[in-house]
Amino acid sequence: MTQEELKKVLQTVNKNIRCPSCGKRYDFPHIHIKGFLNNLCFLELNCPDHLPLYATIAAPISPQNKSQASESIDSDYVIKAYQLLHNHQGRISDLIK
């Protein structure tokens, strides 16, 4: 996720998402980024008067990042991975490089 995409996500959250208990808008100091995964952004939204709201926001995939996100896993890959793990007699750390 680029800086511009992140900025748009935060602006959209600020503009459109409100506390489900009282309806207050989440100001920027109350929006905390917890992490990223591909085009997903994990947020914690804090209302000063209520419990936090945890949200997962999917940002549109930009054209330069589309090739990275379109890596697919087919059924043959899953079967081969299962067979490898099922037949492996050593430690899992030996498989991870």
Image (spheres, rainbow, N blue to C red):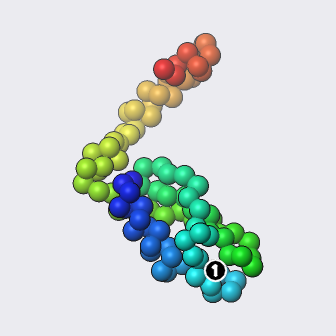
Q: Position of residue 80 (x, y in %)?
A: 43, 27
The one of 57 and 8 positioned closer to us in this rendering: 8
The one of 64 and 25 positioned closer to us in this rendering: 25
- Relative to 40, residue 8 above or below: below
Lateral position of residue 51 relative to residue 53, left or right = right
Q: Residue 32's quadrant in the figure?
A: bottom right
- Relative to 60, residue 84 above or below: above
Query: Residue drawn at (58%, 77%), measured in percent from left and top?
Result: 26
| Secondary-structure class at tag 1 | loop
Q: Position of residue 43 (x, y in %)?
A: 57, 62
Q: Residue 44's quadrant in the figure?
A: bottom right
Give the farthest residue toward the front: 29
- Can the viewer see residue 35 in this picture? yes
Query: Residue drawn at (68%, 86%), measured in percent from left and top?
Result: 22
Query: Residue drawn at (59%, 69%), measured in percent from left and top?
Result: 29
Q: Please state which amino acid type lies under the numbered disc 1.
A: Cys
Give the farthest residue toward the top: 90
Query: Residue drawn at (58%, 19%), measured in percent from left and top?
Result: 93
How many numbered marks have been drawn onto this rendered protein structure?
1
Q: Position of residue 20 (x, y in %)?
A: 65, 81
- Can the viewer see residue 59 in this picture? no
What residue is disc 1 on? 19
Lateral position of residue 82 relative to residue 71, left or right = right
Q: Assess disc 1: are there few (<14), some (14-19) or many (≥20) residues with their C-alpha within 10 Å of its C-alpha.
A: some
Give the farthest residue toward the left: 63
- Relative to 44, residue 80 above or below: above
